[in-house]
Amino acid sequence: MPNSAPPQASPPRALRWAVAGSVIVMIAAGGLFYYASKLAAAKRLANHDEMLVTIESHRCAPDTLTVPAGHASFRIVNRSDRAVEWEILDGVLVIEERENIAPGLSQVINANLLPGDYSITCGLLSNPRGTLHVTPTAASDAAAKARPSMVAFVGPLSEFRVYLSSQGTALIKAVSALDQAIAGGDLSRAQALYLPARAAYQRIAPAAQRLAELDNAINARADYFEKREQDPDFVGFHRLEYALFQQRDLDGLAPVAQRLLTDVTTLKQQLLAQTLPPEQLVSIVVRNLNTLGDVRAASGEEERYSHSDLNGFAGNLDAARKVVELLRPLLSTSAADLLPTLDNALATFDAQLNGLKVDGTYASYDSVSTEQRQQTADKAKALANALDAIDPALGLSGL
């Protein structure tokens, strides 16, 4: 009688659950992409002028766009495996951007665009850039002719230049001290000096973020690089933050600190060399606060290793307060009724941040509750909305 084959052993229960779990995860991921696409399509139906851009791992599609001058809306759908940003660039200058678009989801960028050719980023900083053509219209031609006299803005813009100079000097001094601590092998001192250096950068971040390449060298997060934290192009503040607070190791960090010192020195020079149009004085601060409200306050992604986000938020508030201070004389004449709204929004955001201090210093952001984070985000957005009313009040809207 032939031998019968031994019965096959059933796979272990844990293995069966693991396989089932993997299938569920794949189905869920596919569903998330499908849902994002459907949501984007539904929103395009509601706004037929909204242009869809899909970011994939190493490109965006389409990578060439054409829109008429004026208001334009772009829905950016992220089909890559990491958070990405999308920017509109005029040479080295950032015109509009949206940071930290999560995988499988989408965000909308609204921009007021003048005629001309612009570049667009497509996910990773190493990816090829796309092109955005903005064609002139009768409205854009009329807006150019109706541009208000710039004489009234000479004073505020000159004073903002002085602000950038003094804050740039403070940033260089703070980064120099940090560089010396790292070179001396003093980890605890370097950790302590990272915070004031980072806050000094945030006070000029709205202007610095206009300089795309330099800002990427100084401020880019690991997600925007192919190999994340291990990528050789990952330098700047967040590379130092990663080593100081996560690795807690200064080995090989001295060249990164020296590079950062060189870059912030160049940053000050370039900020003073660039012309800032009056309509961008407020818009750069609004964009920064909207990013804070939409992404940074809610997720804490900006300072993910040190959890020092609140120090940065305070630096952003300082920049907003400075812009209001510079424009107060013009607003007192042209839009005095707007000033109480601005002052209230500044005070409310300030009170929110002060309420998150412990023994006179800002709390670690990982100890801040979800509700407190949302309150902080809401107050940042409220301040951005209040500031957004300044340009129309001064005749700068639509330029």
Image (spheres, rainbow, N blue to C red):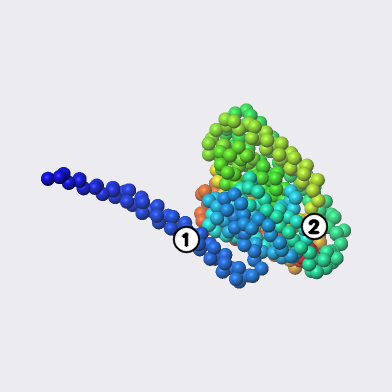
Estimate the x, y position of residue 269 in percent, counting from the top left: 78, 42
Q: Can residue 344 be seen at all in this image of the molecule?
A: no
* Secondary element at tag 2: helix
Residue under pointer 2: 278
Left-right relation of 141 to 77: right
Which residue extends farthest bottom?
Answer: 46
Q: Nearer the viewer, residue 362 or 99?
A: 99
User: Picture coordinates of residue 141 (x, y %)?
Assistant: 82, 66
* Residue under the image location 60 percent in, 42 percent down: 238
Task: Give the residue displayed 47% in from the left and 58% down from the top.
Answer: 30
In the rendered structure, which disc, 1 or 2, sits on the residue that comes first in sequence?
1
Residue farthest toward the left in the current orientation of the protein: 1
Point out the image quarter for the C terminus. bottom right
Which residue position holds label 1?
Answer: 31
Residue 267 or 82: which is nearer the viewer? 82
The mark found on residue 261 in the picture is: none
The residue under the point 20% across, 46% down is: 5
